[in-house]
Amino acid sequence: MAKILEVREVQKSYQIGKIVVPALRGVSFDVEEGEVLAIFGPSGSGKSTLLHLMGGLDRPDSGEIVVDGDSLQKLPDDALAELRLSKIGFVFQFFNLLPRLTALRNVELPLTIAGTPEKQGLEKAASLLKLMGLEARMHHRPFELSGGEQQRVAMARALVNNPKIVLADEPTGNLDTKTGWEIVQLMQKLNKEKGQTFVIITHDPHVAETADRMIFLKDGLVEAVKEAPRRNTQ
Amino acid sequence: MKISRIISIAWENMKQRRLRTSFTTLGVVIGITAIIGLASLGEGFRLEIRDRMQQGFELDILIVIPGSFTTGLGEFEPQEVSRVRNVSGAASVTPLITLPRTRLLNEEDEPLNALTVAGVNFKEMAQMLPERLAPLEGSVPSPEENNTVVLGYKACFLNESTRLVNVGDNVTVQFGAAPYNVTKKLKVAAILEKSGTSGITNFDYWAFMPANTTFNLVKREVYNIILVKVADIEESEEVGRNVEAVFDNPYSVSVLVPLAFMRQVDRILNIVQIFLMSIASISLLVAGIGIMNIMTVSVMERTREIGILKAIGAKSRTVLTMFLAEAMLIGLIGGLIGMLTGYGISYGFAYGLSNLIQSQQSSEVAYRTQNPERLSINPVFSPEWTVIAFVFAIVICVVFGLYPARKAAKLDPVNALRYE
Ligand SMILES: Nc1ncnc2c1ncn2[C@@H]1O[C@H](COP(=O)(O)OP(=O)(O)OP(=O)(O)O)[C@@H](O)[C@H]1O
Ligand SMILES: [Mg+2]
């Protein structure tokens, strides 16, 4: 299987005043096209930091990240924005929808940024919301939606530009177990039906176990990589 | 991202914060109102002054005198006059001769109040200055009659109650220094209306006789003033140069161009207006600082939103443009409203002002003239000023919006997403 994303010896630390906090201390792994990869680990282990670097939202102190053949460190900021727009879809724990826009407009936003004509963009956004089972909620604003619904809107937004890879940072973290499970199922379904690549950060072992592969992160280092038994039998 | 979409998103954002947007815009409205109001009133004021000067001073008439300060006064030969008549840009030309050391005596041998005695061509003079040669009594002889005289109003009075001469009376003209007086008897043909102005063409103390009559007195056919009425007042200076050019020695004539005087007044008014408008512009600057202030707060409030936009792929430039578009829209709307209120206020102000001046004047004893003395300022709609003020509003808003917009554009997406 082709590598869609490579992480090579990535280090990142934060400076708070005079104290340097190492968040990642040399992390390496690959993400293969079409897989669901879970990144699992305790709070503060550097999961979010890693996800931001993988999506080109931030730059590592050292090491290399390659997305779909492009080494990110060589790309200027505008090219990183371009990459986020065309190849990456983000899903966040706190949904991060724009509160003043309707669900439909939130989903259309990446297409707006990409310069897609409004009519076409709205059609595409509507079809994705439909896929997420939110037909009846299209013209609602985020505060009129439940957490699960908001997260599905965020999923639709992440997918609207047909990204190569969806990076989800604790997508179930702010949902009850049942609703969280629905979101996980939805991602599985999209993965099976469309071959969409997912990287899901979680500290819920049940969620992690649904993935094809699991990476254990601890104190900024990869402690273990575990293949799902389901995958081995395939 | 398409600029039209950016603008419509900016517009949506502004609508969501209606109250805040209105207050920010108000500053721009006030600034533009002040600028437009002052520009249109000032221009109206200037035009009114110009108009009055034109009426009072016959600004379209050049006065040509032989000689200069250095060569001393001289005379014009008839052929020089006819050359001036052919100058391009001259609508009409008439020569005069003023007589030095000349007295007019009434039938009782009392001297009249005529300070200047001149020989003129009545027909040409009346054509060039119809209002100045309007008779109060009698009529200006046409065709010319030798040995007649037309008197200015005040030339006929010793003081307000003592009249020295009437139409039909004979007067004696004495020319030259005593005892070599050349004398001649003239008949008073007309007395002119009182002049309403104090300009160069105030003929209240003048006495006019036909040029031929003066030639008989001085025994020569010469002139010493040529009046040239220009076809287009704006070309006064050029016509003046044309006049100089017809003389063998252009340095031997002086051409007085009254327009030059008015231009100076115009320049002064201009300076005053620019001064007032720069003060008005300060209010626009204050509005700009208000925009900067409010947009900076707005950027802080919308930090998370900016982070989201960047995370899903908006470039820094797009974020910058979004905020600048808001600033620009404020300038656009503020400019438009300010323009309307600016013109509205200046028309209202002008109306009030002319009423005020009118009521003040009615209590004074009005000078008797053909045009009632009434100051009416008509505000002028100037397309240039409108465009300048409008562009100025937008530029100020964009310039002051630049700082907060750059702040927004430079936000680090990861930190922005963390921002609560
Ligand atoms: N902007 C920042 N400034 C300073 N320190 C930071 C910053 N972001 C992260 N850190 C630190 O880096 C380390 C890793 O943080 P990160 O958010 O990646 O952890 P995480 O695995 O996502 O944790 P959680 O499961 O709680 O979300 C932590 O110690 C955190 O305090
Ligand atoms: Mg995290």
Image (cartoon, grey):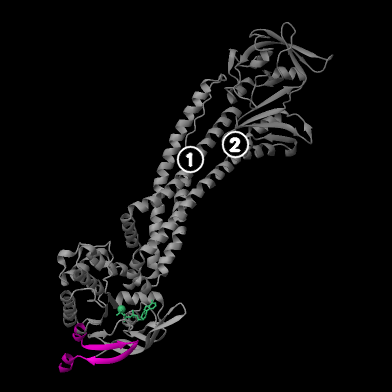
* Whole-percent x, y for residue A18 in the image: 47, 79
Quarter of the image with the N terminus of chain B is bottom left
* Whole-percent x, y for residue B414 in the image: 36, 74
Label 1 sits on residue = B40
| Number of residues whose C-alpha sits closer than 10 Å to that of mark 1, classed few (under 14), some (14–19) or many (20 or more) | many
Residue flagged by tag 1: what amino acid is it?
Ser
* Whole-percent x, y for residue B355 in the image: 47, 27
* Whole-percent x, y for residue B193 in the image: 59, 17
Label 1 C-beta lies within 8 Å of the nearest ligand 1 atom: no
Q: Residue visible at 40% across and 60% down? A: B297
- Mark 2, mark 1: which one is toward the viewer? 1
Write the start and end of the magenta stretch as one range. Answer: A206-234
**CB of mark 2 within 8 Å of CB of mark 1?**
no
Q: Residue visible at 56% across and 33% down? A: B49
Quarter of the image with the C terminus of chain B is bottom left
Label 2 sits on residue = B89
Badge 1: chain ID = B
- State yes or no: residue A223 in magenta: yes
Element under disc 2: loop
Residue sitting nearer the eye, B353 or A186: A186
Element under disc 1: helix
